[in-house]
Image (cartoon, coloured by chain):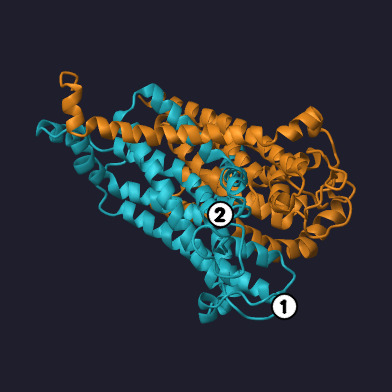
Amino acid sequence: MNARLRWRKLVSNFMLTMTGVCAFVCVSVLFLILGYLLFNGGTSVNWNFFTKLPAPVGEVGGGMANAIVGSAKLLLAASLFGVPVGFLGGIYLAEFSGTAVASVVRYAADLLNGVPSIVIGIFAYSLVVLPFKHFSTFAGAFALGLMMIPITLRSTEEFLGAVPRMLREGAMALGASKWKTISTVIVPAAYRGILTAILLALARVAGETAPLLFTAFGNRFWSNGWNNPTASLPVMIFTYAVSPYEDWHRQAWAAGLVLLGLILIINILARTILSRGIAVPRG
Amino acid sequence: MGSRSFLSRLREGDEIARLITLIFAAMVVLITLLLVYELWVNSTLARHKFGLSFFVTRVWDPVTDEYGALPFIYGTLVTSAVALFLAVPLGIGASIFLAELAPPRISDTLQFFIDLLAAVPSVIYGLLGIFIVVPLMRTVIYPALNKPLGFLPIFKGPSYGVGFLTAGIVLAIMVIPYIISVSREVLLSVPRDQREAALALGSTRWESTWKVVVPFAKTGIMGSIFLALARALGETMAVTMVIGNTPTISASLFSPGDSIASVIANQFTEATGDLYLQSLIGLGLVLFLLTFVINGLARLLIIVTTEKGSKVSN
C-alpha cells in the first residue's frame, strides 16, 4: 500500500466518521431539549398547574387550567374547520379533478403551507378580528385551521392515490357508483394514512404561537364561549418566558414540558398508526 | 361512465359528491388568493405613503409616524445567513451518514428522532434560547469569539447575550431537521450504479460519496437548503425571544437587532395608528413575498433532482 493510497483511506475514514459525528450531534439535540425541559419543568408540573387559574401578577403560585382548556378549544375548532376542507378537497384532487385544476389547487396548497405562521396571523386578524372588532377563540381557530388545510389536503390526495387500482376496479365491476366506491372502498383502505396526516397536522398547530398572538390573544381568566379572547399554552409559555418574574419562568418550563410531551405523544402515536398493519403499499 | 346520463349519475350521488368536494378544493384556492389580497389591500396606506423607500429607510418611529423596513430586513437576512452557515455543513454531514453509511435500521431510527425534532414547536426553542443559549452566549461563546477574533467587524463590540448571533444559532438548530430529511431523501434516490461505478474505478468510500453521489444530488440538496432558508426567514417566536428587539443595523453579530417576523409579533397588538398597523402588514407582505420566492425555488430544485434520479435508473 503506497503512501498516497494510505492517505486517501485515512481521509475517507476521517470524513465518514465526521458525518457520523454530525448525525450524533443533531439527534442529541432532541434529547438535550427533553432533558432540559424535564429538569427545569418536571418539578413544577403538579396538580395546581392543571387545575388553577393563573395567580394575579406578583403573586406566587397558580396554574394554567384556562390555557389548557383554551388550547383544547382552539384545536377542536381548528380541526372542525381545517380537516373537512383538506379532506374533501383532497378527495376531489385524487378522484374527480382533471390535471389542470388539480395542479392549481396543489399549487395553492403548497403556497399556503409555505406562508410564515405570523403572516397567517395577520390574515386571520384582518379577516376575523377586524370585522368583529375583538379577539376571539374563533379567530385563533381560523388561523390554526388554515395551517391544517394544506397538510391534510396533500396527504389525503397522496394516500387515496396510493390505493391499488384493483380495489377500485373491483368495486366498479360490482356495479358500485363512483361515490359509493370512494366512500366504502377507497377511503377505508387509506384511512390509516389520512388519520396519521391529520394527527401530524394537529400536532404541528398545537405548538403554534405566532398566529395566536393577535387572534386568540390571551386571557388570565376563563374564556366564555367561543367569541372571547382566550389563553393558550404556547402563548402562555411566550408571555411567561419573557416576563421578569422567577415564578413565571418556572411555570413556563412546566408548560413547555406539558406542551412538548403532548406533541411528541401525538407524533409517535400517528407514526405507529401508519407503520402498523398498513393497508396501502407506500409509493 | 360517459354513456350514463347526468341524471342517473346525480341519483347515485356522483355529481353531488363531485360538486361538494369541488367546492372545498376551490375554497383552498380562494383562501390563498384572499390571503394575498388582504395583505395587499391592508397595506395600501403604507405602500402609498412610503413607496419603494420603505425598503431603504432606517427609521422606525411610531411617535413621528415614520416607518422603514431596512433594519428588519437586515435582521431577517443576517440571522438566516448565520443559521444556514451553521446548519448546512452539519445537516449535510448528518444526511450523508444517514443515507450512505448507517444501516437501514439505524438510519430509520435516527430519522425518526430527526422528525420528532422537526415537530418541536418554535416557542419551546425560544424558551431554551432564553434560558440556555443566552447565558451560554455571555459566558462561553462571546469570550471565545471576541478575544481571538475581535478585530473582525462581525465579532466586535459588547454582547448582551441576545442578538443576531444568538438568534442565528437557535434558528440553525431549528432548520437542521429540514435539511437532513430532504437531503437524505435526495441522496437515497441517487441510483446504485453511480456508487458502484465509482467504487469499481478504485475510489474510496468517501470519494465515491463526495465526488459522485453528492454532485449527483446537488440540486436536491440545494433545494433542501432553500427550504430551510424559507423556514428561517419566516420563523417568529424563537427569534423574537432571543434577538433583542431593537431595530439596529450593525455589522457586529453580538449586537441586538430585530427581524420582520419578530417586529410584527411584538408590535402588532400595540399598533394604534392606521399607518403604524398598515406598515406592519406591509412588512408581512414583504415576508410573504420573500418566502414565496424561496419556497418556489426550493420546490423546483427538489423536483428536478428526484426526476433526474428516476430517469437514470430507468
B224 up-or-down from B264: above or below: above
Residue B204 in sight in this render: no
**Element marked by disc 1:** loop
Q: Quadrant of the N terminus of chain A?
A: top right
Q: Residues within 10 Å of mark 2 (few under 14, many from 20)?
A: many
Q: Position of residue B31 (x, y in %)?
A: 50, 36
Instruction: Please tell me which residue lies in front, A172 or B33.
Output: B33
Dot placed on the residue nearer the N-terminal end, 1 or 2: 1
Instruction: Please tell me which residue lies in front, A133 or A232.
Output: A133
Residue A32 in sight in this render: yes
Of discs 1 and 2, which sits in the foreground?
1
Chain in cyan in the render: A
Residue farthest toward the front in the current orientation of the protein: A132
Q: Is residue B303 left or right of residue B20?
A: right
B100 up-or-down from A247: above or below: above
Q: Which mark is residue A208?
A: 2
Q: Is residue A166 left or right of residue B194?
A: left
Q: Position of residue B289 (x, y in %)?
A: 64, 33
Tell me how far mark 1 sits from mark 2, CA to CA.
27 Å
Is the same chain shared between marks 1 and 2? yes
What is the drawing colour of chain B?
Answer: orange
Question: Which chain does the residue under circle 1 lie in?
Answer: A
Q: Is residue B122 left or right of residue B265?
A: left
Question: Which chain does the residue under circle 2 lie in?
Answer: A
Q: Where does label 1 land, which residue?
A: A58
Q: Quadrant of the C terminus of chain A?
A: top left
Instruction: Please tell me which residue lies in front, B279 or B101.
Output: B279
Q: Identity of the amino acid at label 1? A: Gly
Q: Residues within 10 Å of mark 1 (few under 14, many from 20)?
A: few
**Element marked by disc 2:** loop
Q: Identity of the amino acid at label 2? A: Glu
Q: Quadrant of residue A184?
A: top left
